[in-house]
Image: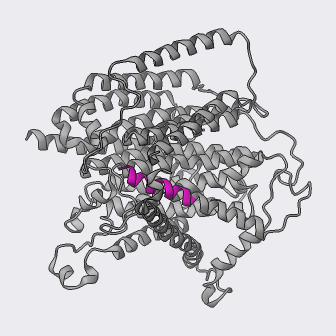
C-alpha cells in the first residue's frame, strides 16, 4: 500500500516542480521594469483610497460553516456506500435514520432563510 | 535506518516545527497556513501507519473544510494585517488546559494496549481500509453514529442561530417568480399616441 | 549507510515513478495548450467567427505564441502584496489540479498508482483547490481580487457538497473507492455503465464540475464586467500562466472523471458483442477513454458558447436548494432498491 502512496507523493512533488519551473522560466525570460504606478493595486485608475482587506458579510461565514458540517456528512457516507454489501439491511436503516436527522437540519436551514442570497 | 523511519522523522520534524509556528507567529494568516502544513504532515504520519482512510479524511475534512473556514475568518476579522493581541489573563487558563492535555497523553502512553514501537500489521493484498471501517461503524457502533448525526444537527442549528441576521429592509429576488413572468405581465402595446400621465 | 540506499530495485522503482509522472504530465501540458486553441476555435465557430487564424496554418501555432508571450511578460509584484504568499498561491492552485492524475486509470492496468481509496483522494485534492484562490485574493491586497476570492470560496465549497453526494451514488453501485474497480464494475456493455441508473447524479456531477472549475456559465468569480478578472487581477506573465494551467487541467480532470465514473472509462460500448471481438478498434482500450474524455472537454466549451452567465444568487440557489435535495433523494432511492434486494 505504501508503495503506491510513494508514487502519489512523488507525483505531487513533480507537479509542484512543474509549477516552480514555469515561474522560474518566466523569471529568467521576462524583463523587470517596476515603477510605483505599475505596482499599485488595480482600482479603475484611481488611487486606492482604502485598505483592500475589508470586513465581509457574515453570510459568507455561514455558508462555509454549513459546508464544513455537510462535508462531514459526506465523509460518513463514503465508507457506508463502500461497505453496503457488508452492513446489510441494518446498515441501510441506520444510515436512513442518520440522513433523516440531518434532513431536519437542512429543512431548518431552508426555513430560516440561511440559504437565501440577496 | 529504514526508509519509513526516515520519512517518519522527516514528517515528525516538519509537524513539530509547523505546529510551533502556528502558535508563535504574530501574523494570523501565516499562523493558519502553518496549521495547514502541520495537519498535512500529520496526515502523512497516519499514512505511514497504514491508516489510509483516516489519513485522506484528515486532508479532506480538516484541511479541505475546517481550515478553509479558519482562513476565511482570520483573513476578514481585522482590517489591517491581523496580529494577535497578547492578553496576560488567558495564560493561566491556557496552562491549565495544556496541563490536562499532557496528563491525558501521558495516560494514553502508559496504557497497557499502547506501545510506542508497535508496527501495523502488513495489510493483505485485497484489504480495504475503508470497507473494514464501514462494516463496523454502521452496525456495531450504530448508536455512536446516530449520536454524531445529532451533534451535527445541533451544530447546524447553533451556527444559524449565531450568525444568521435576517434584515427586513433587504429586497429579495425570487428566481421562480422571475422565470414565470410572461410577456403580457410586463409589456403593453400602445398605438403610439401620447397618453395622459397615470 | 542504510541498505535501502544501496538497493538498486528501490531506485529503479523511483525512476519508474518519475518517468511515469512525466509521461502523464508533459502530454497533459500539451493538451492544455491545444485545449485553449480548441476553445477559441470552437467558441469562434459557435459565434460564426473564425477564431485564431494568423499564426501558422489555420492558427495552429497560436498556443506556442501564447506560451512564449506569457513567459516573456513581466511578473508584476504589487507593492502592497504579501510577496511570499503572492507567489505561493499559483502553486497552491496547480498542485491539487495536477495531483489527482496520479490515480486516474487510462486503460486496464495502465495507471501510475493503484490506491484503494482513489476516489476519496481525488475528492480531497478537489477540496484543496479553494486555497490557491483564497490565498491569491488575500495576498494581492486588492479589492477586486479579494471580492473574487470570497465569491469563489463560497461557490466552490457549496458545489463540493453536491459533488460529494453524487459520488456516494457511484460508490453504492461499485462498492469500491478504487477507480479501476469502479470501471470494472461497469463492464458488460453500454447498458451496464453507471450513467443510466445514476442519471440525476451524473447531471449534478457534471454541472458541479463546471461550477467547481469556475467555468461559464458559473464564472462570476472572474466576472470581467464587474470584477475585472476576480482573484487573479494582479497576476501577470508566468504567475498568471500557472493559474491558467491549473484551471484547464482541472477541466480536463473533471472530463476524465466523468468518463471514468459514469461512462465506463476505457470500456467499449460494444464490449462482449461479436462485432467488438471481430474489429479490434471497437474493443475496449485507451482510445475509448480518450474519446469519452474529449467529448466532455468539448461539453465545457459548448456550455460556454451556449449558456448566458448565472447570477450569484442563482448559483448558490442551484447548489444548495436543487442539487443537494436531488442527490439526497437519489441516494434514498438507491438505498431503497438495495433494501428491497436484501429483504425481498
Residue B128 in the image, given as x and y percentages of width and height: 28, 45
The foreground one among C330 and C85 is C85
Query: For this view, does B189 lie left or right of residue C167?
Result: right
With respect to residue B57, does B194 lie above or below?
below
Q: At 73% from the left edge and 50% from the top edge, which residue is drawn?
A: C86
With respect to residue C314, does C110 lie above or below?
below
Dividing the image into 4 quarters, which one contains the C terminus of chain C? Answer: top left
Report the colour scheme.
one colour
Magenta stretch prevailing secondary structure: helix
Q: Is residue C234 visible?
A: yes
Query: For this view, does C244 lie left or right of residue C327?
Result: right
Q: Residue furthest front?
A: C1
The foreground one among C254 and C42 is C254
Please report the bounds of the magenta region as a residue range: A1-15
Residue B178 in the image, given as x and y percentages of width and height: 53, 47
Q: Residue A71 is drawn in which quadrant?
A: top left
Let me know if residue C137 is in the magenta part: no
Q: Residue furthest bottom?
A: C57
The foreground one among C242 and B119 is B119
With respect to residue B82, does C169 lie above or below?
below
The mark tally for this picture is 0
Residue C18 in the image, given as x and y percentages of width and height: 49, 64
Q: At 31% from the left edge and 66% from the top edge, which residue is drawn?
A: C109
Q: Residue furthest right?
A: A36
Q: Residue furthest left?
A: C344
Q: At 43% from the left edge and 59% from the top edge, which residue is drawn?
A: C7
Residue C320 in the image, given as x and y percentages of width and height: 46, 41
Query: For this view, does C109 lie left or right of residue C131?
Result: left
Q: Is residue C314 visible?
A: no
Query: For this view, does B164 lie left or right of residue C174?
Result: right
The foreground one among C261 and C300 is C261
Amino acid at each position: 500500500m505504501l508503495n503506491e502512496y510513494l508514487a502519489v507523493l512523488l507525483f505531487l512533488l513533480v507537479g509542484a516542480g512543474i509549477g516552480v519551473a514555469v515561474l522560474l522560466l518566466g523569471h529568467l525570460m521576462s524583463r523587470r521594469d517596476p515603477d510605483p504606478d505599475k505596482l499599485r493595486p488595480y482600482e479603475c485608475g484611481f488611487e486606492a483610497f482604502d485598505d483592500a482587506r475589508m470586513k465581509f458579510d457574515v453570510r459568507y461565514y455561514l455558508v462555509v460553516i454549513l459546508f464544513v458540517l455537510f462535508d462531514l456528512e459526506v465523509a460518513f457516507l463514503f465508507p457506508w456506500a463502500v461497505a453496503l454489501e457488508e452492513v446489510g439491511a441494518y446498515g441501510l436503516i441506520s444510515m436512513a435514520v442518520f440522513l433523516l436527522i440531518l434532513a431536519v437540519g437542512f429543512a431548518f436551514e431552508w426555513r430560516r432563510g440561511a440559504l437565501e442570497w440577496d | 535506518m529504514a526508509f519509513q523511519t526516515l520519512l517518519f522523522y522527516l514528517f515528525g520534524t516538519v509537524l513539530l516545527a509547523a505546529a510551533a509556528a502556528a502558535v508563535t507567529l504574530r501574523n494570523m494568516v501565516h499562523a493558519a497556513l502553518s496549521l495547514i502544513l502541520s495537519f498535512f504532515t500529520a496526515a502523512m504520519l497516519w499514512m505511514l501507519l497504514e491508516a489510509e482512510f483516516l489519513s485522506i479524511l484528515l486532508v479532506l475534512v480538516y484541511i479541505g473544510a475546517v481550515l478553509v473556514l479558519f482562513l476565511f475568518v482570520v483573513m476578514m476579522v481585522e482590517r489591517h494585517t491581523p496580529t494577535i493581541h497578547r492578553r496576560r489573563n488567558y495564560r493561566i487558563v491556557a496552562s491549565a488546559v495544556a496541563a490536562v492535555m499532557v496528563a491525558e497523553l501521558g495516560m494514553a502512553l502508559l496504557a497497557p494496549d499502547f506501545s510506542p514501537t508497535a508496527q501495523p500489521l502488513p495489510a493483505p493484498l485485497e484489504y480495504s481500509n475503508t470497507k473494514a471501517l464501514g462494516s463496523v461503524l454502521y452496525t456495531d457502533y450504530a448508536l455512536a453514529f446516530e449520536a454524531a448525526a445529532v451533534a451535527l444537527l445541533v451544530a447546524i442549528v447553533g451556527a444559524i442561530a449565531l450568525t444568521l441576521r435576517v434584515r427586513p429592509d433587504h429586497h429579495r429576488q425570487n428566481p421562480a417568480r422571475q422565470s414565470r413572468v410572461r410577456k403580457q405581465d410586463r409589456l403593453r402595446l400602445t398605438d403610439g399616441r401620447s397618453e395622459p400621465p397615470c | 549507510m542504510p541498505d535501502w540506499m544501496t538497493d538498486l530495485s528501490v531506485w529503479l522503482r523511483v525512476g519508474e515513478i518519475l518517468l511515469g509522472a512525466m509521461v502523464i504530465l508533459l502530454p497533459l501540458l500539451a493538451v492544455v495548450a491545444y485545449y485553449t486553441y480548441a476553445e477559441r476555435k470552437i467558441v469562434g465557430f459557435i459565434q460564426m467567427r473564425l477564431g485564431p487564424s494568423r499564426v501558422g496554418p489555420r492558427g495552429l501555432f497560436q498556443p506556442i505564441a501564447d506560451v512564449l508571450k506569457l513567459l516573456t511578460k513581466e511578473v508584476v509584484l504589487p507593492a502592497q502584496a504579501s510577496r511570499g504568499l503572492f507567489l505561493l498561491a499559483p502553486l497552491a492552485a496547480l498542485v491539487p489540479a495536477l495531483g489527482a492524475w496520479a490515480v486516474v486509470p487510462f486503460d486496464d492496468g495502465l495507471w501510475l498508482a493503484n490506491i484503494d481509496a482513489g476516489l476519496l483522494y481525488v475528492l480531497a485534492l478537489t477540496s484543496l483547490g479553494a486555497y490557491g484562490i483564497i490565498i491569491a485574493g488575500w495576498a494581492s491586497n486588492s479589492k477586486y481580487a479579494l471580492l473574487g476570492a470570497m465569491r469563489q470560496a463560497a461557490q466552490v465549497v457549496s458545489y463540493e457538497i453536491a459533488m460529494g453526494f453524487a459520488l456516494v451514488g457511484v460508490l453504492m453501485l461499485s462498492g469500491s473507492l478504487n477507480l479501476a474497480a469502479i470501471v470494472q464494475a461497469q463492464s458488460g456493455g453500454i447498458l451496464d455503465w453507471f450513467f443510466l441508473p445514476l442519471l440525476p447524479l451524473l447531471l449534478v456531477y457534471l454541472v458541479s464540475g463546471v461550477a467547481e472549475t469556475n467555468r461559464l456559465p458559473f464564472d462570476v468569480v472572474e466576472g470581467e464586467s464587474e470584477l475585472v478578472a476576480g482573484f487573479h487581477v494582479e497576476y501577470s506573465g508566468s504567475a498568471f500562466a500557472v493559474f491558467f494551467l491549473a484551471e484547464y487541467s482541472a477541466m480536463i480532470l473533471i472530463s476524465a472523471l466523468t468518463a471514468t465514473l459514469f461512462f465506463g472509462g476505457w470500456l467499449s460500448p460494444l464490449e462482449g458483442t461479436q462485432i467488438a471481438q471481430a474489429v479490434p478498434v471497437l474493443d475496449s482500450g485507451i482510445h475509448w477513454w480518450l474519446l469519452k474524455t474529449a467529448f466532455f472537454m468539448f461539453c465545457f466549451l459548448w456550455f460556454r458558447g451556449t449558456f448566458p452567465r448565472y447570477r450569484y444568487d442563482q448559483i448558490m440557489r442551484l447548489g444548495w436548494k436543487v442539487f443537494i435535495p436531488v442527490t439526497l433523494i437519489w441516494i434514498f432511492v438507491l438505498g431503497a432498491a438495495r433494501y428491497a434486494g436484501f429483504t425481498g
